Amino acid sequence: KPAPRVHVPLPRHARPASSDDMVKRPLDQKPAKKPSTPCFGSGPCPKRPGWSLDALGSAAVGRSHRSALGKSKLKEAIDETHKLLGLPDDYLVGIVPASDTGAVEMAMWSMLGPRPVDICHWESFGKEWYTDAAKQLKLEVHDIGASTYGELPDLSKTNPAHDIVFTFNGTTSGVRVPNLDWIKDDREGLVMCDATSAIFAMDMAPWHKMDVITFSWQKVLGGEGAHGMLILGPRAVARLESHTPAVPLPKIFRLTKDGKLIKDIFEGATINTPSMLCVEDYLDALTWARGLGGLDALVAKSKANFAVVEAFVSEHSWIDFLAKEEATRSNTGVCLTLDLSGDQVKALQKLLEKENVAVDIGAYRTAPAGLRIWCGATVEKDDLAHLMEWLEWAYVVVSSDGPATSK
């Protein structure tokens, strides 16, 4: 467990006297080392260590995605995803349009309607799923939401007779579900999980708790955007084949034909044209993940990265997690608050960007002013340690009459 936070009456910019690694340089002096990459953004996320364009040399560019070569690469991406995640044999994986958003919307528009829906949300994307269900699909929706950023709603209020939609990890709030104990094994309704910033970085088992799981390539594995992944359990397939949506579905949402699942989508065919360059990049990310040690190694690395930030926060009274409860703190998109004004936070971000230390680390536009630092497995622990040193320096500069950022 991390050391308890220490608050002592020292000068504003000093570390607590109990710190084991006292800074050996003046706090207003720039650190000697920078991260090897300034990329700590939460989507698109950093590429895997050592990545270069050479990794895409075998891409099926200029070839049809329907050709034997194109389809084999799409099928390989599906099969390797299934294997890496350790999904149940009867769970299907498909590549769909429009990133994670497309995958979530496809599932909602295709499957929701037969039962009331509990929408669990505690940040901006979950709130969008609530809005779509209530105002666009006009379903009977039960709002199970948090009153403020940084909190998790009471998930025990979900009804197992209802369909449930939830986000495993709140990308814009840094709040995650600690476990899936609140989902009943004998539920009557479907459970849909937006897992895009959790999958490959958090223990999401047991998979049977979720009937629909969605994610995109540009999060934990550092892939490219525009492509979504849709995972269906047998109960979701049964719903698709027994339910006719009350609203017309556009082509890119259609998962059935004549009342039967379009199985080709889960065998290497796609609804629309994918980028074979992006497919190759995803295959490269999967190969890297296997080489790292698979799913357990990915999760362990993300947790170790988070521990670097956690230790820093525990030693500094001017910074804190947006997530109120320790058990709900994300180990991927780590959201932080600072005792600075909104303008000062922006100035701090600009300082770090100008120094080529960190880019894209601002809080999401609808979240409270602060920072959001990606700690997924494509990030190196040493880089985070260097970033923390620079973060302290930048804080000193913007919160006082500190030195200029350059000569």
Image (cartoon, rainbow, N blue to C red):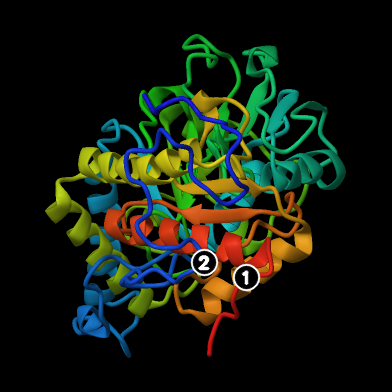
Q: Residue at x 39, y 43 (%)?
A: 306
Which is more toward the observer, 193 or 174?
174
Asked if residue 266 lies left or right of residue 325, the reply is left
Q: Position of residue 247 (x, y in %)?
A: 78, 47
- Mark 2 and mark 1: Cα distance apart in space: 7 Å
Asked if 160 appears above or below 103 in the picture, the reply is above
The numbered mark at residue 402 is 1
**Residue 120 in view in this figure:** yes
Q: Position of residue 91 (x, y in %)?
A: 35, 35
Asked if residue 53 lies left or right of residue 146, the reply is left
N-terminal of the two: label 2 or label 1? 2
Q: Are marks 2 and 1 in contact (CB under 8 Å)?
A: yes
Asked if residue 123 lies left or right of residue 321, the reply is right
Number of numbered callouts drawn: 2
Residue carrying label 2: 28
Secondary element at image label 2 = loop
Secondary element at image label 1 = loop
Amino acid type at image mark 1: Gly
Asked if residue 387 lies left or right of residue 402, the reply is left
Quarter of the image for the N terminus: give it: top left
Which is more toward the observer, 331 or 214?
331
Image quadrant in which you'd find residue 142: top right
The numbered mark at residue 341 is none
Q: Residues within 10 Å of mark 2 (few under 14, many from 20)?
A: some
Q: Position of residue 274 (x, y in %)?
A: 43, 73
